[in-house]
Image: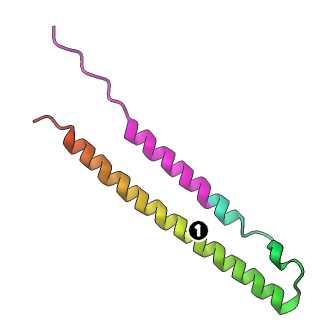
Amino acid sequence: MPPQPRKRRRFYLWLFLAVQLLFLIWVITGASTASGTPEDCRRLTGDDLKLCEDASEAGTTIGVGLIIGLWAAVDIILGFTYVIYRLAGRRT
């Protein structure tokens, strides 16, 4: 009797989706910190308040950009890892 084929496990698919969900939550959380007046700007008025709020928004934008860059790098690494895993598992 021939051996039954093993059921394919989708480990990389679930790992990839979990990483995407974590990064999505991270980006949303990071972007939501820009709403409202920052704690350090509460006692300022006029041009000083505007400058402080603009600096806070610029910092948030840079932070979210860095998260997205890290997200892309992790996706590339996961993609290469998957390709290597598939090539190593091929039957010759």
User: Residue 37, can we see it?
Assistant: no
Q: Position of residue 14 (x, y in %)?
A: 45, 39
Q: Residue furthest bottom?
A: 47
Report the magenta residues as a range: 1-27
Identity of the residue drawn at 47% across and 63% down: 70
> In this rendering, is residue 11 above or below 79?
above
**Residue 43 image-quadrant placement:** bottom right
Identity of the residue drawn at 81% across and 76% down: 40
Q: With 82 as the anchor, is 15 left or right in this view?
A: right
Whether the magenta-drawn stretch holds residue 17 is answered as: yes
Main SS, magenta region, reads helix
Identity of the residue drawn at 20% across and 44% down: 87
**Residue 65 image-quadrant placement:** bottom right
Q: Secondary structure at mark 1?
A: helix
Q: Residue furthest left?
A: 92
Task: Indicate the amino acid at tag 1.
Answer: Val
Q: Position of residue 9 (x, y in %)?
A: 36, 30
> In this rendering, is residue 3 above or below 46?
above
Q: With 65 as the anchor, is 74 left or right in this view?
A: left
Q: Which residue is mark 1?
A: 64
Q: Residues within 10 Å of mark 1 (few under 14, many from 20)?
A: some
